[in-house]
């Protein structure tokens, strides 16, 4: 049974890994806000469990076992977020910190019951896929709004960032998942977009915001 600290390392490795499963020690240190010696000490523990492979002066490699262990932690987190929103009426901007605590509970039956009560959701409130009980994750072909062109109509299905501040900003603009957005024009100077949606006939979104909104084309 992994401790909360170990589980946080696994999640960080999962999120930082490139396509080859590699993670730099310095990136892991920065992400977790701990020193490199502390990370090196923990890596030995992770390697003993078969969750990572490590050779001196080379990047860490998260193993298949490590990816599955991390995905199952992420599953608990995202199921909790969805349950808090769907069954308990929390806003999508309120649930992350609660889920950070709940995800460390070692009670598979609890999360299986959450899953069942919600009729097995595929995505969390921010559009991120919920891993299944085997740690498998659905991959989605979304693109950032910033990569779209003027005149395009798109549907917002996920976010690449879900900080409380960003979600509160979206709430203040009436932006939520499944929203259909029309791109009216793009400012060449700063790539900000003039868009329209629902009761907002003319809203300007900055480049930073557009980079974080993940969309699909509306046919």
Image (cartoon, rainbow, N blue to C red):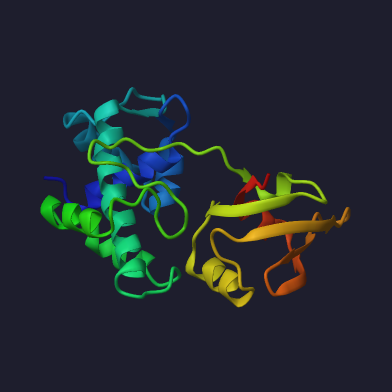
Residue extending farthest to the right is: 188
In the picture, measured across the screen, residue 169 lies left or right of residue 131, that is right
In this rendering, the count of numbered labels is 0
Quadrant placement of the C terminus: top right
Residue in the image at 56% along x and 73% along y: 171
Residue in the image at 41% along x and 25% along y: 57
Q: Position of residue 212 (x, y in %)?
A: 61, 54
Determine if residue 22 is in view. Answer: yes
Which sits in the foreground, 23 or 189?
Answer: 189
Q: Position of residue 74 (x, y in %)?
A: 31, 48
Quarter-of-image position of residue 78:
bottom left
Quarter-of-image position of residue 113:
bottom left
Residue extending farthest to the front is: 219
Q: Position of residue 101 (x, y in %)?
A: 25, 64
Q: Position of residue 16 (x, y in %)?
A: 44, 40
Q: Measured along the vertical axis of the image, is residue 17 above or below residue 77?
A: above
Quadrant placement of the N terminus: top left
Which sits in the foreground, 31 or 169?
Answer: 169
Determine if residue 8 is in view. Answer: no
In the picture, measured across the screen, residue 215 lies left or right of residue 42, that is right
Which sits in the foreground, 195 or 212?
Answer: 195
Residue in the image at 11% along x and 53% along y: 109
Q: Measured along the vertical axis of the image, is residue 24 above or below residue 32?
A: above
In the picture, measured across the screen, residue 188 lies left or right of residue 72, that is right
């Amino acid at each position: 049974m992994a401790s909360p600290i170990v589980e946080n390392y696994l999640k960080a490795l999962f999120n930082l890994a490139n396509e080859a499963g590699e993670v730099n020690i310095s990136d892991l240190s920065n992400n977790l806000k701990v020193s490199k010696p502390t990370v090196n000490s923990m890596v030995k523990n992770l390697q003993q469990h078969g969750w990572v492979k490590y050779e001196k002066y080379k990047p860490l490699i998260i193993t298949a076992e490590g990816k599955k262990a991390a995905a199952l932690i992420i599953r608990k987190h995202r199921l909790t977020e969805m349950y808090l929103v769907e069954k308990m009426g929390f806003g999508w901007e309120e649930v992350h910190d609660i889920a950070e605590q709940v995800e460390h509970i070692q009670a598979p039956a609890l999360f299986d019951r959450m899953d069942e009560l919600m009729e097995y959701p595929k995505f969390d409130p921010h559009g991120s896929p919920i891993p299944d009980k085997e740690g498998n994750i659905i991959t989605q072909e979304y693109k950032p709004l910033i990569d779209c062109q003027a005149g395009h109509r798109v549907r917002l299905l996920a976010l690449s960032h879900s900080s409380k501040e960003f979600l509160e900003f979206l709430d203040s603009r009436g932006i939520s998942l499944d929203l259909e957005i029309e791109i009216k024009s793009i400012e060449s100077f700063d790539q900000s977009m003039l868009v329209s949606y629902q009761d907002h006939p003319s809203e300007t979104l900055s480049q930073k915001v557009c980079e974080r909104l993940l969309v699909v084309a509306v046919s």
